[in-house]
Image (tube, helix red, strand yellow):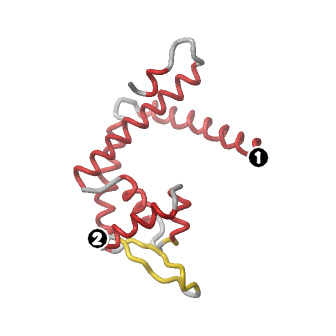
Amino acid sequence: MDMEARAHSEHPEALRLWLRLLTCTQIVEKQVRTRLRERFDTTLPRFDLMAQLERAPDGLKMNELSRRMMVTGGNVTGITDQLVAEGLVDRVAVAGDRRAYRVRLTPKGRKSFHEMAHQHEGWIVEAFAGLSDKDIATLHKLLGKVKDHARSRVGAMA
């Protein structure tokens, strides 16, 4: 049973919408995870780490990677160790800080990531193929309102 099946007609429409969003996210994410594993023998966390590094050509410190990915340093270290062993990323010492280093994509890693990213983009486009361009634009705008409101509430709760 998916998240949405928990909702009943007597629940507020907003709750039913929230559960539908969660269900859609879970379905698409499962498809992406499966395809990454089957086509590239990799995981979504590895793809996400490489995506962060692709956006930062000079590399990122481990704590910055952890913050951007919203995971613990231990998780980032484990993934990084695997990617270093495969020659997809390397570690570069940070001048003036003997304990710190930057992680960056190697040329092999950049090539590998670009291949995965191209496929990933196609999978996401496919996931939304049931919507028109206008539907997608409208949904994007409406979810932007939800995001802005939620962010303003976080500040009000502090």
Q: Position of residue 29 (x, y in %)?
A: 38, 42
The residue type indicated by label 1 comes to Ala
Q: Residue at x 57, y 16 (%)?
A: 11
Assess whether mark 2 and mark 1 are in contact (beta carbons under 8 angstroms): no
Q: Quadrant of residue 85?
A: bottom left
Residue neighbourhood size for the residue with mark 2, other residues' Cα within 10 Å, grouped as few (<14), some (14–19), many (≥20):
few
Secondary structure of the residue carrying numbered label 2: loop
The residue lying at 57 percent from left, 19 percent from top is: 13
The residue that mark 2 highlights is: 86
Q: What numbered label is drawn on residue 158?
A: 1
Sequence-earlier tag: 1 or 2: 2
Task: Specify the farthest residue to the front.
Answer: 74
Q: Is residue 28 left or right of residue 60?
A: left
Q: Position of residue 51 (x, y in %)?
A: 42, 60
What is the count of numbered marks?
2
The x, y position of residue 149, in whole percent, is 67, 37
Q: Image point 53% across, 79% down: which residue?
A: 100
In the foreground, 128 or 25: 25
Q: Is residue 87 above or below residue 141?
A: below
Give residue 57's mark: none
Question: Circle 1 sits in a helix, a strand or a loop, which is it?
Answer: loop
Q: Residues within 10 Å of mark 1 (few under 14, many from 20)?
A: few
Task: Return the x and y of residue 40 as percentages of the image width and height.
Answer: 25, 56
Q: Amino acid at mark 2?
A: Glu
- Which quadrant of the figure contains the N terminus? top left
User: Where is 10 relative to 110, above or below?
Assistant: above
Extreme-top residue of the structure: 10
Q: Left or right: 122 with respect to 136?
A: left
